[in-house]
């Protein structure tokens, strides 16, 4: 069975993202969701190309406990019986990452000006100036953003609209809804 699983992984690795999602969606025969968890049934004939060689004739069942928790204005499903693990806001992480990239470009090239960075990014100088300040967020705020444990009300749009990010990390925490460190 291990060889078949390895073959399945190799086949999936050769597919693009959308093809891989479509292939896995075709393998699912049933999904049951209730208060105790999620159960996914997979068809054995779709798992391995030459399934006629497999002794497996019944559905493969995967079950995982779930917890439903808030996420912004919606809900998120947390799989497993572990503590809540953050689900990073990709746009928020990208916004902070780009600020760090700009700061690195600015500091590493003495000839590079913020005006040139703003022009290369297609932004007004005032917008680039506001966004590069995100590279100076408190380290614990950056860690929370990357880990997906930042307050739900903190999102990329809110950070983009900030006119003046305080230099003080304590003031940043207060403004962005983080607890103060003791």
Image (cartoon, rainbow, N blue to C red):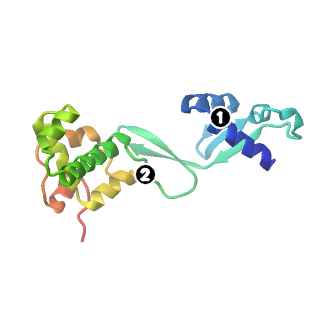
Choose mark 2 or mark 1, whichever is in front: 2
Name the element at disc 1. Answer: strand
Residue at 11% in and 47% down: 164
6 relative position to 170: left or right: right
Residue at 11% in and 39% down: 115
Q: Where is mark 1, residue-wise?
A: 31
In this view, 171 is above or below 63: below
Q: In terms of depth relative to the viewer, which is nearer, 118 or 58?
A: 118
Residue 146: horizontal and vertical position, in percent? 37, 52
Q: Which comes sooner in the sequence, label 2 or label 1?
A: 1
Name the element at disc 2. Answer: loop
Residue 162 in view (yes/no)? no
Residue 179: horizontal and vertical position, in percent? 26, 61
Residue 78: horizontal and vertical position, in percent? 51, 47
- In the displayed image of the protein, which residue is found farthest to the front? 111
User: Few, some or many C-alpha atoms within 10 Å of disc 1 (few <14, some 14-19, many ≥20)?
Assistant: few
Residue 132: horizontal and vertical position, in percent? 18, 47
Q: Which mark is residue 100?
A: none
Q: Quadrant of residue 129?
A: top left
Q: Where is mark 2, residue-wise?
A: 86
């Amino acid at each position: 069975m291990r060889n078949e699983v390895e073959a399945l992984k190799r086949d999936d690795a050769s597919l693009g993202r959308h093809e891989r999602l479509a292939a896995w969606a075709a393998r699912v025969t049933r999904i049951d969701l209730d208060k105790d968890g999620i159960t996914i049934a997979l068809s054995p004939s779709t798992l391995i190309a030459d399934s006629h060689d497999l002794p497996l004739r019944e559905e493969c069942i995967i079950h995982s406990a779930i917890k439903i928790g808030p996420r912004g204005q919606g809900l998120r499903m947390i799989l497993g019986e572990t503590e809540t693990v953050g689900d990073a806001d990709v746009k928020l992480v990208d916004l902070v990452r780009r600020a760090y990239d700009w700061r690195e470009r600015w500091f590493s090239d003495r000839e590079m000006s913020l005006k040139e960075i703003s022009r290369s990014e297609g932004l007004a100088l005032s917008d680039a100036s506001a966004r590069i300040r995100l590279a100076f967020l408190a380290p614990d705020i950056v860690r929370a953003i990357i880990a997906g444990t930042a307050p739900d009300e903190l999102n990329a749009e809110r950070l983009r609209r900030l006119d003046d990010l305080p230099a003080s990390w304590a003031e940043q925490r207060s403004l962005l809804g983080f607890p103060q460190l003791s």
